[in-house]
Image (tube, grey):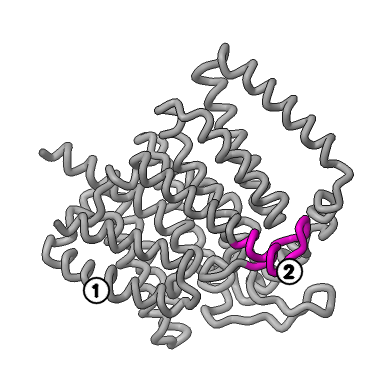
Amino acid sequence: MSRQYFAAALIVFLLSYVLMASSKWTNNIFYVFVALPGLVFLIKERGAGLFSHKLSWAWVVFLLWFLVPAAIAGDGQFYKHILYVALFVFIVGGLLNPVFFRSETFGRALFWVICLYIYACAAYGYQTGEFRFGGRVGILPARMENVIYASIWLFCALALAMPAWVRNRRWIEAFAAVVLSVVAVSFVLQTRTALVGAAFLFSAWACYALWRFPRVAGPWLLAFAVMGGIVLWVIKDAQWFHNLFARGDSYRIELFQVMVGEWANCGWLLGCGVEFHTDKLLSGVMVIQHPHNIFVAMGLYTGGISLVLFLIVMAMTLIEATRLRDPWGMYLACALVMLNFDGSKLIGNPDELWPLVLLPAAMVLGRVVQQQQRKRW
C-alpha cells in the first residue's frame, strides 16, 4: 500500500512543477506528502533494504560530506537541505514500485505533459501578444519558468519514453515526439543547450542502432540525415534560425573562466562556501547569478571533494543503469550533458534540478536495490 501512495505522491510532486505558480506549493507538497510520510516508512521498514548495495553507501558518503561545508558556513538551513535531498533520494529509491515508473504509460505521460505544456504556453503567449511568432518564448509559467530547464526536461522525458515506443512499434508517435521536441527547442524556446542534448541523444541512439541492427539502421539513418539536411537548407535563411545563433556563446566561456577562477582563489578542496556570491561582472557590466554549470557549481560552493564524490555516484549510477538496461540511465545522462551549460546548487530546496538529476539517479538506485533483494530471496 505504501508503494502506491508514494507513487501517487511523486506524480503530484512532479505535476506541481508544471501546474503550480509558486515554489512554495511545490515545497509544501514535498514536505507534507513525500518527506514526512517517507521518513516514517523508512524507519518502520528499517531502511527498506536500501543499504544492501554499495551504490546506497556511495550516496550516504556523498551526502554526509555536505555536513562539512554546512559546519563551516554555520548555516542551519543548509543542514535542512541536506536532509531533504537525502529523504527524496532514499524515499524514491526505497519506497517506490520500479515497474510502474518504467512502464510505457508513465514514460508517454511524462513526455506528452511536458510537450503540451510548452506548446500550450507558447500558443497563449502568441495569442496575447506577449511573444511574437518566430521570436523566442523566453519564459514559461509555473515552476518550470526557466525555458532552458524546461527544454532539458523535455529531452530527458523523450529519452525515457523512446525505448517503450520502439519496443511496442509505435513508430508514428515516436517520430512525432522527436519532431515536436526539436521544433520546441529550436523554434519555440530557442535553447541551444537542448540542441546539445538532442545531438547527444540522437548520436547515442544511432550508435546503438548501428551496433544492434546494422543492416536495418544504416539505410534509415542515411534517410534521416538527408531529411535533416533538406530541412536545414529550407530554414537556413529564416530570421528565427539566425537568432538562434546570434547570441554567441551567451558568455558561457567567460562565465566558466570567472567562476573556476573564483573557485581556485578560495581553494580547490573546500570551495568558496554555500552562500558565496561573486562581485565580478561579465564583460564588466552583467551581474553573475550562478555558474550555469552543475559541476562548477558543485566545486565552487562545496569544494572539489564534493565534486569528486558526485562524479563517483553518477558514474556508479550510469554503470548500473547500463547493466540493467534501465531507461532512467539515459534520462540522467542527457540531463548531465545539458547541465554542463546550466544548473547551480544540487543541495537545496526542491527546484528544477530535482526532477532532472535526483529523480533519475534515485530511480536507478531503486532498481538496483530491488535486484539485490531478489538475489537474496
Q: Where is residue 118 in the image (x, y as percent from the top left)?
A: 58, 57
Whichever of labels 2 and 1 marks the residue nearer the N terminus, that label is: 1
Q: Is residue 72 left or right of residue 7?
A: right
Quadrant including the C terminus: top left
- Dividing the picture into quarters, in which one does residue 188 lie? bottom right
Callout 2, which amino acid?
Gly
- Seen at 51% across and 61% down, the residue is 307
Callout 1, which amino acid?
Leu
Q: Which residue lies furthest to the front in this view?
A: 127
Residue 171 vertical position relative to residue 297 in the rendered view, above or below: above
Residue 36: numbered disc: 1
Q: Does the magenta stretch include residue 42?
A: no
Q: What element carries label 1?
A: helix
Q: Which residue lies furthest to the top in this view?
A: 215
> What distance separates the C-alpha of mark 2 from that of mark 1?
44 Å
Residue of label 2: 129
